[in-house]
């Protein structure tokens, strides 16, 4: 379902080469009223084997609310805001000026060049985000999370063994997973990083000032920088100030390794 906030009328085209029009009309309701387009199953219809590919052209300034049981959503080149949901399938959003909310029960979520804040939740699937200056709240039950050039962000893998990779974090960062976590960026705000059993690797520019608070309950703390004193062998708690100090980087693991480079 799509709804536009402007008076411009969306246009709908459907690719259905394997279905004759009469059969399609018996299985689906396809209705358009001014700025509202609706595609849904007829009551009691069995559309489990029906596959449709349809495109909805909209003006630049719509507010989109899109919901699917199964299938892929691709949304690009609008102002928004956008609320996109799917039961089983992927959501791909790019070049959206305002905020975005996307969720899936099973499926991957992808974002590229989003001007507003992003809310992203999937039960089983990966989340990728590139160029989001206002940041993202990314949560998956089991899957990988990859963020690049983002504002203040939260990245959480709740139960599975998904990996988190962050490059170019421009502000605060909170990241938590059970597996490996890798951050390569310049901390403009404080960071909180944690992993249950994976390796947490933090890469910072040389001679950069920061305050480190690292604790691993049963894993090693490895320092690969010249501007930090290496801990004694077997020491799993490390508090250090590098180059006069700066933003605080807190790292916690239960049985994983912490590597600062």
Image (cartoon, rainbow, N blue to C red):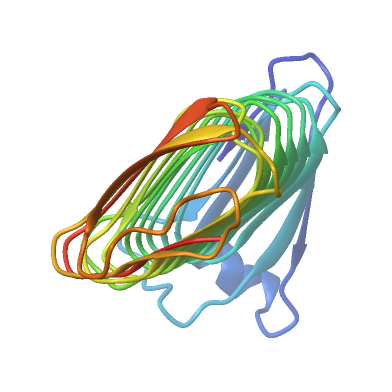
* 165 horizontally vs 85: left or right: right
Which of the 4 image quadrants contains residue 261?
A: bottom right
Give the total number of marks visible in the rendering: 0
Residue 221 appears in the rendering: yes
* Closer to the camera in the image, 178 or 79: 178
- The quarter of the displayed image where residue 77 is located: top right
Q: Picture coordinates of residue 167 (x, y %)?
A: 65, 53
| Camera-side residue of 160 and 125 | 160
**In this picture, residue 218 sits left or right of residue 21:** left
Name the quadrant containing residue 9: top right
Left-right relation of 184 to 60 = left
Q: Which x, y percent locates residue 118?
A: 55, 34
Q: Is residue 53 above or below residue 194?
A: below
Left or right: residue 240 versus residue 237 is: right
Q: Nearer the viewer, residue 87 or 177?
A: 177
The percent coordinates of residue 33 (x first, y second) are 66, 28
User: Does residue 70 appear in the picture of this structure?
Assistant: no
Q: Give the x, y percent position of residue 150.
A: 65, 38
Rendered position, 34 above or below 219: above
Q: Residue at x 76, y 55 (%)?
A: 55
Quarter of the image that includes the N terminus? top right
Question: Of residues 139 and 185, which is closer to you in this image?
Answer: 185
Q: Residue at x 39, y 69 (%)?
A: 180
- Residue at the (70%, 49%) spot, across then down: 206
């Amino acid at each position: 379902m799509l709804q536009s906030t402007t008076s411009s009328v969306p246009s709908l085209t459907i690719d259905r080469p394997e279905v004759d029009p009469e059969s399609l009309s018996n299985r689906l309701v396809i209705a358009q009223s001014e700025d509202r387009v609706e595609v849904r199953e007829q009551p009691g219809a069995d559309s489990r084997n029906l596959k449709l590919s349809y495109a909805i052209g909209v003006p630049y300034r719509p507010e989109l609310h899109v919901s699917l049981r199964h299938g892929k959503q691709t949304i690009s080149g609008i102002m928004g805001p956008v609320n996109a949901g799917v039961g089983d399938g992927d959501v791909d959003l790019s070049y959206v000026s305002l905020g975005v909310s996307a969720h899936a029960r099973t499926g991957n979520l992808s974002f590229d060049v989003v001007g507003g804040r992003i809310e992203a939740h999937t039960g089983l699937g990966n989340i990728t985000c590139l160029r989001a200056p206002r940041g993202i709240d990314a949560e998956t039950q089991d899957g990988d999370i990859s963020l690049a050039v983002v504002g203040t962000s939260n990245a959480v893998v709740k139960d599975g063994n998904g990996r988190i990779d962050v490059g170019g974090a421009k502000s605060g960062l909170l990241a938590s997973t059970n597996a490996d976590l890798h951050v390569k960026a310049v901390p403009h705000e404080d960071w909180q990083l944690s992993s249950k059993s994976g390796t947490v690797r933090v890469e910072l520019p040389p001679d950069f000032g920061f305050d480190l608070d690292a604790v691993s309950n049963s894993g090693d703390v490895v320092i690969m920088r010249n501007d930090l004193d290496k801990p004694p062998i077997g020491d799993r708690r490390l508090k250090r100030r590098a180059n006069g100090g700066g933003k605080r980087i807190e790292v916690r693991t239960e049985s994983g390794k912490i590597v600062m480079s």
